[in-house]
Amino acid sequence: MASRTGEKIGWIGGWLGAFFWVIILTVIFLVQDKWAEGFLGLLLLGLAAIFIVIFAPWRRSSTPFWKLMTPSYVILFGSLLWAIWAFGGIKNSGLSWWNLLFLLPLLIPLVGMGAKTWDDTY
């Protein structure tokens, strides 16, 4: 059996890329002495890193991908709520609730991968 290193890098790199904006905002908030916002960002990043590793599909090869991706998605959307809160609410962030519809394409992997498992994709 192949090591599937590229797929593993894709899983880790993809999720880290999804959270890259949280890293940037966290650093900005900490530099601006917004400690609550910055430390909450660090907490979210820590949870994201833990979930990326714990729910890696090669660790749970018979679990459907949607079950493995859901915890990281929860942290990702929680990070969105954190950012909205950190900027003083939806109005102060320059967004409206309708703008959040642009996030729906983020859910395509849940639909596309759905019930497949790591074992199924080899």
Image: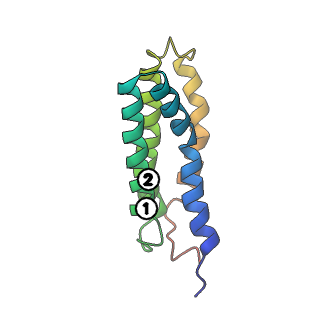
The answer to whether 90 is drawn above or below residue 31 in the figure is above
How far across and down, in percent of the image, does residue 70 sit? 43, 51
Q: Nearer the viewer, residue 105 or 95?
A: 95
Q: Point out the residue furthest to the right here.
A: 6
Residue 13 image position (x, y, % from top left) = 59, 56
Numbered label attached to residue 53: 1
* Residue type indicated by callout 1: Val
Q: Nearer the viewer, residue 17 or 27?
A: 27
Q: Which residue is mark 2?
A: 49
Give the secondary structure at mark 2: helix
| Neighbours of disc 1 within 10 Å: few (<14), some (14-19), many (20+) | few
**Residue 77 disc label:** none
Image quadrant assignment for residue 53: bottom left
**Which residue ends up furthest to the bottom in the rendered image?**
1
Which residue is depicted at the point 41% across and 30% down?
38
Depicted 37 relative to depicted 41: above or below:
above
- The residue that appears at 56% across and 35% down in the rendered structure is 24
- The answer to the question of whether label 1 and label 2 lie on touching residues, with beta carbons closer than 8 A, is yes
Using residue 77 as the reference point, say whether residue 6 is left or right of it: right
Indicate the amino acid at tag 2: Ala
Residue 4 lies in what quarter of the image? bottom right
- Tell me the SS state at disc 1: helix
Q: CA distance from mark 1 to mark 2?
A: 6 Å
